[in-house]
Structures are given as C-alpha cells and as structure tokens.
Amino acid sequence: MQSRICEMLGIKYPIFQGGMAWVADASLAGAVCEAGGLGIIAGGNAPKDVVRAEIRKIKEITDKPFGVNIMLLSPHAQDIVDLVCEEEVPVVTTGAGNPSKHMTRFKEHKIKVIPVVPSVALGMRMEKIGADAVIVEGMEAGGHIGKLTTMSIVPQVVDALSIPVIAAGGIGDGRGMAAALMLGADAVQIGTRFLVAKECTIHENYKARVLKARDIDTVVTCQHFGHPVRTIKNKLSKEYDRLEIQELKQEEPDLAKFDELGQGALRKAVVEGDTDYGSIMAGQIAGLIKKEETAAEIIDSYMSETKAIINDKFNQWN
Ligand code: TUI
C-alpha cells in the first residue's frame, strides 16, 4: 500500500509512531523504522544532549528515515530545533504549539516538516508557509489534546488542504486505520498501541495499566485550566479533578497549582512505574489493547487488517 506520504518520506508503510514524551526513544523509534513505519524520537521536555544521544543511537539501529518530535511548550524547544538541523534529521513533527517561527530554518536544512494541527485554520496556515504534511489528532488521543474528534476533524482538514494528512487519535487497529484512510487521510499516527511494544522501554507497571484498561478508563484533566491531557484514571487524575472543582469556585484561580501537580508526573509513571501519582498518558483505544507485541508485529497487524477490510468491502459492493 504505497501512498504519496510513503514516497515523500521513503518509508514502506503509511504508519507513524507518535513522538510520545519520555516514551519514544531510539529503541522504540528504531524498531518502528526497521519494521517499515516512521519511527519518531520524542523531544518532549528533554534537553539537547539527551535528545542528541537518542538521535545518534537510532542512526546505529537503522539507516531508514526517522523523525524527531519537537514539543513546542518545552523550554528546550529552540535547542531541539538547532539540534535537528545539526544532525540532519530527515523528518520533524511538532506538537503543542505553532511552529511558524522555525519553518525557514527547517526548510534551509531540507527537513520535512509535519506539524500537528488542532484546527482547519492552523492547517491552512501551515500549508501556506511550507509544511510538507500535517498530522490531525483527535481528542481520542492520549496526552495533550485538542477539542475535536478524529472522525470530525480529519475530513474537514482533508477538504481544506492539498498536502497529505496523517490521522491520529483513536486508531487502535486495522479497523481504525481503514476508517482513517476512508476519511481521506494518507497515513495514520499510532501512539497508545506502541506503548506496549516489546521495544518500548517504559516501566512494566505503565504497560500493565494500559493492558488492563477498559473502554471507560481514560479521563481528561485540566479541561478548564492549562492544557487538557488524557490519561488513565488514577489517584493523580482524581487529585486534578478535586483541584479543578476547587479552583472553578475561585474568582482568581491559582494556575500554578496545576503546574505543580503535573511537575514530573509523566516521568514518575514512565520511569519509576508510579501508576498512582504518575501521569499514565494513553488514548481511548487503550481498552482494545490486549497483548505486548514487537513493533513489527503491531505494524504487520495494522497493515494486514486494513488491507483485508478494504478488500472485503470492495468485493461486497462489486
Ligand atoms: O502534543 C501532543 N501531545 C502531548 S505533548 C505532551 S507533554 C505535555 N504534558 C502536559 C501538558 C502539556 C504537554 C503530552 N502529549 N499532541 C499534539 C498536539 N498538538 N495536541 C494539540 C496540539 C496543538 C495545540 C495547539 C497544536 C498546535 C496548537 O496551536 C495553538 C497555536 O498556538 O496556534
């Protein structure tokens, strides 16, 4: 299944692995690249040297194209922009902000730039200033999310733009991938399912919580203050809910309290395996995930399920 995005990036399958902060290291991203997808190293909140080490590692693991995600809320975002230019990273995805001010720099270094856009308007702006494609992420996704669902926003962005669209959020298997392609997406980006990849180095407690999650187990915290984030329900998410109710009653809510609660919470879950007070970011499809597999097995199952569904439908109607 070749598509214009595969041709543009030199990858075999139209599957991106989400650049999940603290999660997406060279081990996971390298395995995804070797399996034919686009592996993406997360910049997250990490400083330049840490990300550089992961870039050097992935270059040892694979000679296939890979990406780096720049999380624009990071205090190190500008450093990571410099880094991807220095290291001649082939593909950059951005998230959690508007990457306009870095675009010329990326283009000078012949980097393919693929921003996450939360709306048609930002998608159009990105196309105008030279983005090579955009990722459209519905609020079914884990982590920091926008307001719209994948089903609603993907076709609207597809209609408004000429560049390829990558759909993300809620795509847990080949059925979801087939649906995203039917909406007009050229590729999909998968986060949550790769959390339980064998090559994913997160704490086993985190993986266990994803494997155990039911359909109703994710929640969105900070809906009213700061940045909305989808996680698996735990003591931390309940603490956020309590704080939100408390601060909604105040005339001048104390936003610093939300930052304080979130400080280091993702690291706590990913590195220390604290699934009570750590932030267990995961998407709504967590309930679909039942087993740990290699990245190659995950990619192969998305591809074979997608092809089977599309063939079946075609045969049914012809
Ligand atoms: O970025 C993500 N997901 C993330 S980032 C992250 S680390 C974090 N943790 C706590 C709070 C905040 C960040 C965990 N998960 N996905 C891509 C994404 N981008 N979602 C939403 C957006 C986005 C939002 C606004 C992209 C652009 C944007 O533009 C606003 C503007 O300035 O025009």
Image (tube, grey):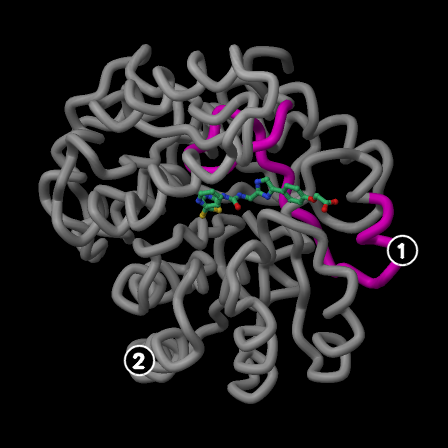
First reached walking from the N terminus: tag 2 or tag 1: 2
Name above or below for residue 90 compared with residue 99. below
Q: Amino acid at mark 1?
A: Lys
Residue positioned 56% across, 84% down in the render: 88
Q: Quadrant of residue 292?
A: top left
Please identify the quarter of the rendering in which residue 165 is found: top right
Residue 159 placement, left or right of 245:
right
Q: Say which residue appears at 60% left-offset and 83% top-offset.
A: 85
Residue farthest right in this picture:
128
The one nearer the camera, 202 or 304, is 202
Where residue 48 sits in the image (x, y, percent)? Answer: 44, 78
Using the image, tell me which numbered label, if any, was put on residue 57. 2
Q: Quadrant of ligand 1?
A: top right
Q: Secondary structure at mark 1?
A: helix
Instruction: Identify the image quadrant of the C terminus.
Output: top right
Whether residue 146 appears in magenta in the rendering, the answer is yes
- The residue segment tinted magenta is 124-147
Give me the residue at 64% from left, 23% from top: 148
Q: Which residue is mark 1?
A: 128
Task: Where is residue 135? Give x, y as percent.
Answer: 63, 45
Horizontal and vertical percent for residue 276? 15, 30
